[in-house]
Image: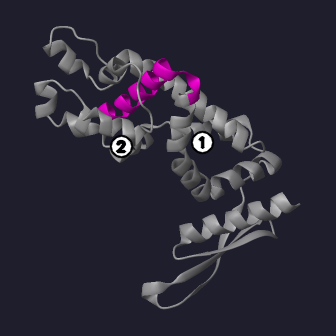
Amino acid sequence: MQDSLEEALGYRFRRPELLEEALTHKSYAFEKGGRRHNERLEFLGDSVLAAVTAHRLFERHPEEDEGRLSKMKAALVSRPTLTRWARKIRIAAYLRLGAGEEATGGRERASILANAVEALIGAVYLDGGYAPAFELVQLWLGEEAAGLEETDYKSRFQEIVQKRHKVPPEYKMVKTTGPDHDKTFTVRVQFGSKVLGTGHGKSKKEAEQDAARDALEKLSQQ
């Protein structure tokens, strides 16, 4: 059964006992008389994940400062992100849980799933070194990072403006078009009377993000 998980990971363990340990929750270990469980691997995997994520963000965003990189990293290594990864590779099916944990829904508990993903990263690192751990995390990060970069234009632009001028930009509704059930909003982002960008969207938030994206593009061209 663990062969299917290795296929989902794209990594074949040379020491399968590491994979088994990564999938063993402490509740199962205690029930079986002190067998090794995944908390130590989770500790290691957490550090590997942080290092790989920082490495990737550092290379992909040479224009960003430490504060912005830290915020992006925090979002990418958060429990919700790890839980999405866990569900994508269906790790719940492979977990070894104690009877009590199983009975109370532990197999779908976000904390258990996220911790198991970190333990898997730690296991890959111990089994094959930094390179395969880097490739594994980078593959998973790809989709998450793309989504983060696409949807966070507004906070990126606000940080730039506040850093330069000490006050945030303003977003002003210009017009709405279309029927009530299918409106399109047009928004401008301004600093004082100067228009920095214009955006459109099916909601005010979407239009503001589009305006911030337009402003960032204009800044990069300057």
Query: What residue is rendered at 44% in x and 33% in y?
Result: 11
Asked if residue 190 is positioned above or below residue 134 in the image, the reply reads below
Label 2: how many Cα within 10 Å (few below 14, some 14–19, many 20+): some
Could you tell me if residue 176 is visible in this image? yes
Q: In which quarter of the image is the C terminus?
A: bottom right
**Residue shown at 61%/53% (left/top)?**
149
Pointer 2 residue: 89
Please tell me whether residue 127 is drawn above or below residue 196 in the rendered image.
above
Say whether residue 109 is visible: no
- Relative to 3, does residue 18 appear above or below in the rendering? above
Residues at marks 1 and 2 touching, judged by CB atoms closer than 8 Å:
no
Q: Which residue lies furthest to the right in this view?
A: 222
> Magenta segment range?
110-131
**Could you tell me residue 190's position as x and y percent?**
75, 67
On residue 72, the disc is 1
In this rendering, would 191 be left or right of 183?
Answer: right
Q: Is mark 2 on a helix, strand or loop?
A: loop
Of label 1 and label 2, which has the lower sequence position? 1
**Residue 181, position in %: x, y?**
42, 86
